[in-house]
Every structure is written in structure tokens, then in C-alpha cells.
Image: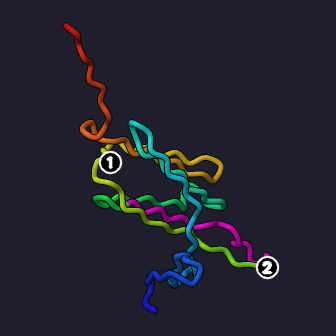
Amino acid sequence: MKDNELTVNKDNQLAAVDKDRTAYVSPAVDIFETDNALIVMADLPGVGKEQLELGLDRTVLTIEGNTSLGTEPNLYREFGTAGYYRRFHLPENLDLNQTTAEFKDGVLTLTLPKAAAAKPRRIEVTVH
């Protein structure tokens, strides 16, 4: 496998091999749509703000986070740590320049506002 080549394993989890980490896992993600925005909430336990990378390239959202667990040389554990990696194709009716991100207690919350043209409108009817 080449460095950073991504594959899907038998459990439909995204996996990659690179020189620093042996696997990526897909974080649990909830996506909500309101009248004004698309809200993406991702669980990233063990990830610090410095290890979190977000990317928006046209209509592709990339979430990548590396865990900081296991840096002590005398630490013994039953399982290895893995990074998180997930990509989404976003609808084109979002105003990506107004995107906000909040990261608290291992939960990333992204708010992707809808463009003005995509928001529902109410038309008042006048009676004569």
C-alpha cells in the first residue's frame, strides 16, 4: 500500500496506512438539517484541538483527528490508538464562508448555514 492510501475494510470502516499510524476509524457522526443550516456533530474522543484538522474543498468536508493517547514509553494497553477520518459530500446550497466550528468535550459541532436562496420563504396572501 502507498503512504496515506485509504481503503474500506470489511466492517465499512475507513482504514489507511501511513508511516505514523496504522489505522483510521470513522467517527460517529450525527447530521441535522434545520430551516437555516446543516449541523454536523462528530464524536472524536481523545483528540485535542491541536490534533484536529477540518477541510472544506468545494463541496467536500473532511474531518481528521489524531489521538494523543499512548505517548508515554512505559504505557501498556490492550489496543492501539487510531486516528479519525471522515469525508462528506455537501449539498451546493450552503454558504460555506459562514461555517462555524465548536469543539467541546470531544464533540465537534459544525454549523453550515444555508444560502439565502435555499432557505424556505413564507409568502403572505392579501385578501381584497
Mark 1–mark 2 Cα distance, whole angstroms, equals 41 Å
Q: Earlier in the sequence, mark 1 or mark 2?
A: 2
Q: Residue at x 40, y 41 (%)?
A: 37
Q: Is residue 79 left or right of residue 108?
A: right
Q: Which of 73/63 is in front? A: 63
Instruction: Please give the range of residues in magenta.
Output: 61-77
Q: Which residue is mark 1?
A: 96
Give the percent coordinates (x, y) of residue 63.
47, 62
Residue, disc 2: 78
Q: Is residue 27 left or right of residue 38?
A: right
Tell me which amino acid carries mark 1.
Leu
Q: Residue at x 54, y 77 (%)?
A: 12
Q: Is residue 103 above or below residue 83?
A: above
Query: Which quadrant holds residue 5?
Result: bottom left
In the rendered structure, which amino acid carries the disc numbered 2?
A: Glu
Residues under numbered marks 1 and 2 in contact, where contact means CB atoms less than 8 Å apart: no
